[in-house]
Image: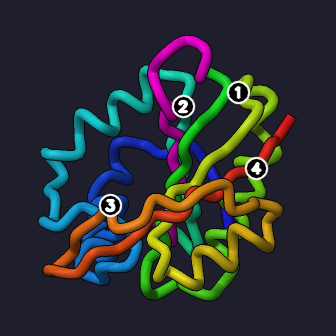
């Protein structure tokens, strides 16, 4: 597995992995699938900031992706990033998400980050378990803040200091 900065040529694979997650209804509050053109500004924003977007590549195929996002844009929050990790259905349970999280933790200090946050649906047991194994703790719960297909869900705030 190679983990590298995402290239614009990777965007179709990134979008397809994200659309798989949208269809799965367990890891994103986005309800409608997105197109490459819709995600292009998001991709370019990552390229223009200090919040990288990485892909995990296996045998020339994009297996997953990872992104950092500003938690809150006010200056005092600059040392905290919200993170997202998505893995293609084909590569799930193969260590891709773990490898991406490990890289994020290892590179946080050079990105001037002191804390990482994951906002995870409370019913997404695999992601919650992975984050716990990677040293994240449950820092909070936002009950019933997401409505997916008529069902209310909570968001677990998983946090980890990294400096």
Marks 2 and 3 in Cβ contact (< 8 Å):
no
Q: CA distance from mark 1 to mark 4?
A: 15 Å
Q: Closest to the observer: 6 or 118? A: 118
Q: Nearer the viewer, residue 49 or 31?
A: 31
| Residue 36 at x, y percent in the picture | 19, 52
Locate the N terminus and report the quarter of the image it occupies: bottom right
Question: Taking 131 as reference, is 49 above or below it?
Answer: above
Question: Mark 2 or mark 3: which is in front?
Answer: 3
Mark 3 or 1, nearer chain start: 1
The residue identified by callout 2 is 51
Q: Earlier in the sequence, mark 2 or mark 4?
A: 2
Side of 125 where 148 appears, left or right: left
Q: Which residue is mark 1?
A: 111
Judge whether residue 135 is colored magenta.
no
Q: Position of residue 155 (x, y in %)?
A: 45, 64
Point out the frontmost of discs 3 and 4: 3
Locate the C terminus and report the quarter of the image it occupies: top right
Residue behind mark 4: 160
Q: Which mark is residue 17?
A: none
Instruction: Give the residue pinned by disc 3.
Output: 145
Q: Are marks 2 and 1 in contact (CB under 8 Å)?
A: yes
Horizontal relation, residue 77 to residue 19: left or right: right
Residue name at image x 62 percent, y 69 percent: 97
Work out whether residue 37 can be spotted.
Answer: yes
Viewer-nearest of labels 3 and 1?
3
Sequence-first tag of 1 and 4: 1
Left or right of 138 in this view: 140: left
Q: Which residues are magenta?
A: 61-77
């Amino acid at each position: 597995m190679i983990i590298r900065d995402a290239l614009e040529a990777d965007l179709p694979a990134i979008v397809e992995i994200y659309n798989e997650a949208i269809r799965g209804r367990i890891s994103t509050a986005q309800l409608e699938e997105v197109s490459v053109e819709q995600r292009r500004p998001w991709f370019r924003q990552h390229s223009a900031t200090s919040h990288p977007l990485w892909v995990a590549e296996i045998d020339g195929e994009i297996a997953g992706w990872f992104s950092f996002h500003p938690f809150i844009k006010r200056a005092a929050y600059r040392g905290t990033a919200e993170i997202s990790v998505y893995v293609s259905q084909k590569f799930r349970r193969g260590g891709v998400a773990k490898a991406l999280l490990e890289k994020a933790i290892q590179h946080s200090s050079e990105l001037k980050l002191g804390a990482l946050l994951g906002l995870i649906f409370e019913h997404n047991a695999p992601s919650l378990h992975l984050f716990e194994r990677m040293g994240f703790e449950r820092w909070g719960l936002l009950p019933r803040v997401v409505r997916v297909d008529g069902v209310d869900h909570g968001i677990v705030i998983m946090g980890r200091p990294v400096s």
